[in-house]
Each structure stands twice: as structure tokens, then as C-alpha cells.
Image: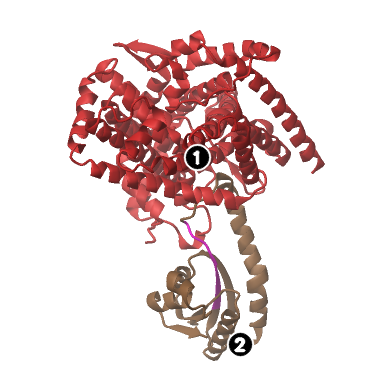
Amino acid sequence: MNKIAINGFLALLFCFAVAGASAAHAQSEQGALSPTQAWIEGIEDPSLGYRSWIHGIVPAKPAEEAPTGIDATINAITAPVASFIGQVVFFRVEVFGAGLPLVVLWLVIGAVFFTAYMGFINLRGFKHAIQLVRGDYADPNSQGEVSHFQALATAVSGTVGIGNIGGVAVAVTVGGAGATFWLIVAGFLGMSTKFVECTLGVKYRQEFEDGHVSGGPMYYLRKGFSDRGMEGFGKFMGAFYAIGIFIGALGIGNMFQSNQAYVQLNNVAGGALDGLGWLIGLIMAAVVFMVIIGGIKSIARVTEKIVPFMALFYCLFAVIVILMNITVLPQAVANIFAGAFTGEGVAGGALGALIIGFQRAVFSNEAGIGSASIAHSAVKTDEPVTEGIVSLLEPFIDTIVICTITALVIGTAQVADPNFAGEAQGVAMTSAAFAREFSWFPVPLAFAAVLFAFSTMISWSYYGLKGWSYLFGESSASQINYKVIFCVFVALGCVVQLGPILDISDALVFLICVPNILGLYFLAPIVKKEMNSYFARIDSGEIKKFK
Amino acid sequence: MTKTMLVGIDGSAPGTRAAEFAASIAGAQKANLLVVYVIPWSPFTFNTPEENESRHRRREEEIELARSKMLAPLLDSLAGAGCKVEGLVRHGRPAEIINYVAGEKGAVQIFIGRTGDSGLKDLLFGSVAGNLVQTASVPVTIIP
């Protein structure tokens, strides 16, 4: 126990050191964009930086004090690293006037390959996925284990986030209505990638003596490659992934989320929370602390329960708003199809729309990044393929349903009144589209966004933890260290604009899709064999249906 | 072949009474008695990833606890009833699981205690006894 306390304390010290450094850095960061940022931005509004391009948001205002001595040093150290990693990871090729980030191309090629190689599992497995989630194949004698529904719900709450609300608005603004069409196509293809990575996550997970399990890309990369006699390479890939997911969890899965939660709350409060970021940050950190360290599961349960309701509530109202604009709906749908193939008014034409749509889908459903694979690995099942099949539904729910609905709300609003949003972008634009019909909607929408952010933080705290414990061991002392660091970063996210750190985190999250997809290609034959065997046993009746 | 009878218990007094009553009937008919305790559990709840991860271990702990605290004392007290008594712990919706186990083990009769929770709670969720009466495929005896 003492060791845990000391470890926790040291971790805390470390965090304060980082906090001080980052805060100092943030103050120096306002003003002009770095050349790299400007370079990476390409086609979007340069004032937002490429984070907005990924997440579709407007960052909170940085602190307004003058820079001090330390931050110049910090800036000098972190910014070049961030710039370099950002340049490499989000490297864009100019294709007919539209910038195509290679990482998006890498993910999309993977998705196309897995869709073809697995024989359109995204279509074939869909009905079976729903049967599995309904529990049709659940043996009543082994009830009490994590159900397919629970695994799916956990993974979905990690992906449904602010991007579904704000990111789509940015995609439609930049890529035109046609981006929606390609978003759906990419979501559909991403289902196959998810299938492969989640099946592998379960198949190669590590079971520990006390009965708990850890899994995810770091495990299947290491074991998969060493099974083929490439032990050293496998170890390197596994460790690389673990570092990436850990740092990604602190940025994309943490600071960014708490920052956006604060922005949403502040918007609703009409700016009354200006300068109170530290307070909101502390409150959020305290709540996260209670959940992940205090083990107060009731809070987590409440959020995990509210989030699906919020998602349903969001979809329901979106459908109502669309129905209220039913007269312009045919035009909005026609715009989507026309835009998809002509790309009128979009930089790069149809190809530009395609790139933006694909990009949004990839960033939203995380297929190919491997994060959901970590969540699914926690499930005890004898058939890894079943987890893969269930995970097909995640890109479907996240991208094909929620993102598309958002796009239609915005699309119909645009047809009805091209200037409905004024200058608003991102979440504010979606909010404005809803507010045309329900003036009170921005308040519950902001509330939903905060909860989405919170549940994403909880899910990502787990992903990061798995990366951390892969590197530093599963002992509780080591886990406490990680969790304390995580909580401090929650608070930091609201207070400071950690530009370079967030940039590094964003970049790493997409950088780890390189080893991940490489591993997926390599291990795909194993998944295919398991899949064929599974479906053969379903057909022969060896795997029984209970309902 | 010896007949099997099934009694569902939930740790309440009516449940225990049901078990005693079932044991006396089973003893008289030279039948085996299967005592089933179902830990209420739904596959449609929302969990954190960490809960999912430790779920397998928790499940085993829950089963162990139900066995040692609930089933074992009851089975001991039924030892003199003159029938072979066996215990079983399962997770799930009680009525559904009792029904399923009855089918699986070929039970000819189900005994169940009536807790007598009336009013809103029953109206909303239905009682296990009431559910069994509606869905069971073998005769059900309800013990008040």
C-alpha cells in the first residue's frame, strides 16, 4: 500500500511538472500559427489548426497572460517534435487540388482490402451481428459473463463523441453535401476493418492468473508476428503501439475531451465560465478520479446509461428536425448524390468530397486504429469471431447512422436557408441547424456533448491504461501511477491550450494505425480461417441457437 | 428412472418454505430435488471497460458466494427430507432461467415461493412466480 502511495505521489509530482511546463507553453502559443500548422492545414480554415480538421471543433481560448521564461524553452523542445510528427503522419498528397493525407489513404485501402478478402463480411455478418447482440446465441448456462451487447455498448461509447456532432458539420462545410455519400461508403468499408481487428484482439489477448484479461493490438502484433518467427519485430510493433495509444489517450481521449466539454458548457452559459476553466477542469478531474481510481462505479454506470439515451435522444430529434423539413429533404438528398460525383464548389471536385468524407468517417469510427479491439478483448468468449462480428455494428452506428443523420439535419437546413448558421462552425453549426426548429435545443445538445466527452474519457482511460500496463506491468502500483497522470491531464485540458502536446497525441493516434493495419494484413488469413470455420459450424447447427 | 423436481429459491423466507415443501413432496415421491438459485443479471446493461475486464472473475465470486451463503445451509437443512438434493447457481432473469433449467434437466414440476411484493414493483416488473405460471412448460406449484 505504501508503495502505491509513493508511486501515486511521484506520478502527481510528474504531472504538476508537466502542467506547469504546459501552462507556460500555452501562454506563449497564442498568436501566429507555426509554419507546419499552416502547411498541414491545407484546405481548411487556417485559424483553427489541423485539430479542427480532425475533430471538427473550435478550440477554447488560451490563457491571456504574457509568456514567461520557461515556456520559450518548452516551446523550443516540444513544438519541433510536434511539427515533425504532424508533418510525417498527416502528410498530404495533392490530388487534383485536394490534399489527401496518406494516413487516410492507408486506412481506406486497408478497409477495401478487408471487405474484399473477408467476402463482404460487413454485409454477410450484419444480420448475425444483430442476432448475437440480441442474445439469440447466448447459452443460458453461461450467463453472467459480459454479453455481446455490453461489449458493443462499451466500445460505442468510446467512439461516439463530439466528432459526430461537430466533425460532420466541418466535413459538410469543406467537402460539400457530397462528402456525406463518401462518409457512408467509408463507414461501410470500415466495418470490415473493425471485424478483423476485434477478432484478433480477442484471439490473442493475454489472460492473467487472477482471471483478468488484457488484449488489443499490442498483444496481437507481438504474438502474431512472433508466431511467424519475427519475434523482435513483433515486440517492437507491440511496444510502439502501446506508446502511441498511451499518449493518444492523454490527448485525443482526455485533454481534448475535457477541453471541449468546457467549451460547450461555457457556450451554453453565454461565456459566464470564462476564466473558470480551472474550476470545471478540477471538477471533471475529480469525477474521473472517483470513477477510475475510487472505483465509484455508480458514476460510470450513470454516464454509461445516459450516453446511449443521449445518443437516442439526439437521433430522435434529428429525425424530427429532418421530418419537419421534409419538403426540402429530396433536394438535400439529391445534393448529396450530385455532390458525391460532381463535387460542385468543392476544392478538388468529386475527389475532394470523397477525401473529406473518407477522412471524417475514419476519424469518427476509429476503424483501423485498434482502440475498439482493446475494449472487446475484455470479453470472455470461446469464439473470437463473435466479437468481431458484433463490432461490425460500431462503424454502422457511429458513422452510417449518427453521422449521416447529422449531415441530413445540416443538409436540409442548408437547402431551406443557405445562411442558417451565419459564421458558426463545427458543433455551433449543428446546433444552429437544430435551433431553427427547436430554439431550446442547444442546451441539451451541449449537455449531450459534455456527456459524450466524459464517456469517451472513461473509455480512453482504459485504452491508455492497457498501453501503459503493457509497457510497465500490470501491478496495481503501476496502474495507479497511470490513473493519477490521466486525472491531472483531465484538469489540464480545460485550463491550457496544450497545442504541441495535443498535436503529438493526434498524430500518434493515427501513426499507430500503420503497425496496426500492417499486422491486420499479416494476420488476416488466420481471421479468415476462423471466420469460415465459425460460419460452417453455424450452418451445420454445431453452434446452437438458444432463442 | 427417478423423477426430478425443481425449486427456485431467492434467499427469502417464502423461498426457503418452498424448498422445504418441495423436499417433502420429492421425498414422498422418491424424486430428486434440484434447488436453483438465480442471481439476477441482465445482458443489456452498460458497463465500463474495467468492469467488463473483471466480469469473469466477479461472476465466479458471485457464484461462490451464493453457494456458500445461500445454497449450502439450505441443502444441509434439507438433508433429512429423504430425497437426493442438488444445488445449482445460475445468472440471468430468474423465471427464464428456472424454466430453461427445468427443461434441460427434465424436471416434472417446479416449486416457487411467492414473495408477495405487491403493488407498483410487481406491476412494473412482474413477479418470478407470476412469470413462471405464464411461461413454464411443466406444472408450477406456488408456495405463499
x, y percent for residue A537: 37, 50
Chain letter, colour red:
A
Q: Which residues are magenta?
A: B34-43
The Cα–Cα distance between marks 1 and 2, rounded to whole angstroms, is 62 Å
Residue annotated with mark 2: B82
The residue sitting at 64% across, 21% down in the picture is A22
Q: Where, by quadrant of the figure, is residue A491 drawn?
A: top right
The residue sitting at 40% across, 17% down in the picture is A45
The residue sitting at 79% across, 36% down in the picture is A6
Could you tell me what secondary structure mostly forms the magenta stretch? strand
B44 in relation to A126, above or below: below
x, y percent for residue B1: 48, 82
Q: Residue furthest top?
A: A35
Report the amino acid beneath label 2.
Answer: Gly
**Which quarter of the rendered picture does the N terminus of chain A lie within?**
top right
**Colour chain B is painted in:** brown
Name the subunit of mark 2. B
Name the subunit of mark 1. A
Report the amino acid beneath label 1.
Answer: Val
Query: In front: A473, or B134?
Result: B134
